[in-house]
Amino acid sequence: MGVVLGTFSMHTKQVSYRTDKVDDELEMTMVCHRPEGLEQLEAQTNFSKQELQVLYRGFKNECPSGVVNEDTFKHIYAQFFPHGDASTYAHYLFHAFDTRNNGSIKFEDFVMGLSTLLRGTVRDKLEWTFHLYDINKDGFINKEEMTEIVRAIYDMMGKYTYPALKGDVPKAHVDAFFEKMDKNKDGVVTLEEFVLACQEDENMMRSMQLFENVM
Amino acid sequence: MAAGVATWLPFARAAAVGWLPLAKKTMPKPPIDKKNRNDEILFVNVSGLRFQTWKNTLDRYPDTLLGSSEKEFFYNEDTQEYFFDRDPEMFRHILNFYRTGRLHYPRQECIQAFDEELAFYGIVPDIIGDCCMEEYRDRKKENQERLAVDTEAEMATDTPLPPHSTHRERLWRAFENPHTSTMALVFYYVTGFFIAVSVIANVVETVPCRPLKGSKKDLPCGEKYSLAFFCMDTACVLIFTFEYLMRLFAAPSRCKFMRSVMSVIDVVAIMPYYIGLVMPENEDVSGAFVTLRVFRVFRIFKFSRHSQGLRILGYTLKSCASELGFLLFSLTMAIIIFATVMFYAEKGTKGTNFTSIPASFWYTIVTMTTLGYGDMVPNTIAGKIFGSICSLSGVLVIALPVPVIVSNFSRIYHQNQRADKMRAQQKVRLARIRLAKKGTTNAFLQYKEEGGFHDRDHDGALCLKNRSSFEHQHHHLLHCLEKTTNHEFTDELTFSEMCMTESVGYRTSRSTSISSQQGVSTSCCPRRAKRRAIRLANSTVSVSRGSVQELDTLHVHKTTIRPQSRSSLNARTEDLKLNCDDRDFTAAIISIPTPPANTPDESLPPSPAIPGILRNSRSSSFTHETVKISSL
């Protein structure tokens, strides 16, 4: 008898749970996400404790709930590139950071990504970049994926550039890129081809060093 | 860019690594950041209340005081903190701005105090968050209105006339503010009286008087005593015309004056009379002429110049134009709807009053405004039902916009009351200020009298001790000024005495124009001194001076002055001897930048470019050997 009543009430509770979607969402945003301990993060990344503290303070200030969703990310990124439309690139960037693919970036993801970009080895950085370009994460970069990325980057430039964007500049850019990267000319670029081609490019190696002290 | 975004900038820069493989050119070098990356806690002491915050927090907004290097000026080495001598309660809000990126306006604080704090800390008020922006704007507007009213009241009525006003300006002022002079007041009351007379005459002339002998019909008084009324009308119109022409003449901007409401009313009030004069005694036109006489009632609006309450009412109606418009519009809609309904409801009834929809308008209006004359009444049941609905809705529709209008009127009325009170208090305030000013100058003069200048021995020094160091320094400053210009301070009383009692020809020319040629000049004390023609021994002085500045000086100098190239003064100085021994005489100087070529006299200081110094020599031991006129 009690069981029957219990299941009954459970059932009704579930129904009401399903209908209250809005309140549900509100509750979700109220929930805070707390990162793992400081020591753990220190072990997993190449940042010192102070740096992690500074990073977390900034992050927490911006996102008190502890997570960044894609819209917020797009909005933030768009502030840096007011001339053009940064939403597409931000989308790809978001997914590059969101390693667990659950639609939100937590502090750990944020810090891991930054650690790779700023304190990682050259190979780590190149791997990260490869993952950024590989939209469907299948281990290969094909022309379509590359074109999308390049177009997204050119979108950030906006309309008013010097010299003006005439013709299909992104396509030409992609062709040049594939010329360089695709060693065996099979139409896709693998990770090894990518790393090899980049390591041969001295300019790029030099530029990579410049980004060390951003933090 | 929002400040919070600055936190993400390192992240965005790091993500730029993703562009590297695609880059066609080498990346530029990043800016070298020499700053110590480790974050530190800063201490900020605001009037004793200690705040602590991260340095990064303050660095978020580098164009404010706390975010820039400007705060180093307030750094206290001993206590290792930044000290600000400001309101600690307000600082809390300022600091929260840095922390959250949004500035909030505390409702219990005075808007001006808040603005001042923001200005001090270099924060632009536009950053106030949306939650508090509306309140901030409202309070600010209210405050500005209040200040505007106050300054208007200050400037408007009781400021004394600038000394160079022309007749026209004086006339205009007399018209606008009748309280300034008795003539204006008299004129004001006379016109008011004639307005009243004219309006009463208009009213009375339609009253039926006893008929002439032999006639049965009652005659309106206007026709019985037509000559008398005509004379009265003529007199009033003459006065009004005269007033209008005078105002037109005196107005600073004639076009603007002609477009103003009062002037239009004036014109409309007097035009019918003239048109009536001009128009022939034609039967056809006299119908139109009769209509024109209706406009004579506009004369009553001329009273609004005399009554402030009327003006307030008019202003209220103007400012509530939108509410009134809404009222009118909604009423019109309702009238049309109900009139239509009533017409069709009553259509069947025999001998009904509701002959057409426009005829039903009258019923609807009378019912909605709850007048209910009863000249048109519905007979059918449907008509009665709709009639009752009509009257109920009328009450509602009219009751809605009325409170808005009332509150507007109340606000404006109270503002005006406040303005009047301010004006009354202004007089007291000005008197107090004048007293204070006199106090300070008198203090200096007293100081001089007691011989504070010279090095005193102990006795003298004792009596000077009870003055604060501030006063000492101030007096020293004034003394330096005296020495610089070689003129001394004096007070108003002695100066005006001097003006009145001088009998020696000294030259003062008031205006900048060189009218002294004619020997006519106004005295330096416009109110009391009489105007007299000044004997001009040497009229060439002002001529020789090219520059046009005011000359109003008399300089008494103790030592003999050898007037050298003060061209025409040379001859004069020996002549002029003031024959007052004990009397104080004073001189007033107004801005004398003497061209250096004209003053090789070494006794005169080379920099007489200091305005407005009065000089007094009280000491009776002065022998007035020379009188020197410093001119321009």
Image (spheres, grey):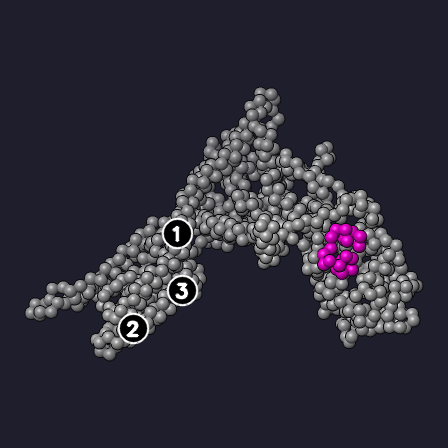
SS label for mark 2: helix
Q: Give the residue at x 86% y 60%.
A: A126
Q: Are marks 1 and 3 in contact (CB under 8 Å)?
A: no
Report the residue that reaches farthest toward the top. B459
Label placed on residue B345: 2
Residue stretch rendered in magenta on the structure: A94-113
Residue topped by disc 3: B325
The chain carrying label 1 is: B
| Nearer to me, B509 or A58 | A58
As shown in the figure, which amino acid type bears the numbered disc 3?
Gly
As shown in the figure, which amino acid type bears the numbered disc 1?
Ser
Q: In this rendering, which labeled residue sits more in front, label 2 or label 1?
A: 2
- Of marks 3 and 2, which one's residue comes earlier in the chain? 3
Q: Give the residue at x 76% y 72%.
A: A164
Q: In this rendering, which labeled residue sits more in front, label 3 or label 2?
A: 2
Label placed on residue B410: 1
- Mark 2 and mark 1 on one chain: yes
Q: Give the residue at x 47% y 44%.
A: B505
- Of marks 1 and 3, which one's residue comes earlier in the chain? 3
SS label for mark 1: helix
Separation of disc 3 and disc 2 at Cα? 30 Å
Other-residue count near label 3 (Cα within 10 Å), few / some / many at <14 / 14–19 / ≥20 = few
The chain carrying label 3 is: B
| Nearer to me, B272 or B210 | B210
Q: Residue B292, how many percent across, how many down?
A: 28, 70
Residue B416 as seen in the image, left or right of residue A83: left
Separation of disc 1 and disc 3 at Cα? 20 Å
Other-residue count near label 2 (Cα within 10 Å), few / some / many at <14 / 14–19 / ≥20 = many
Separation of disc 2 and disc 1 at Cα? 44 Å
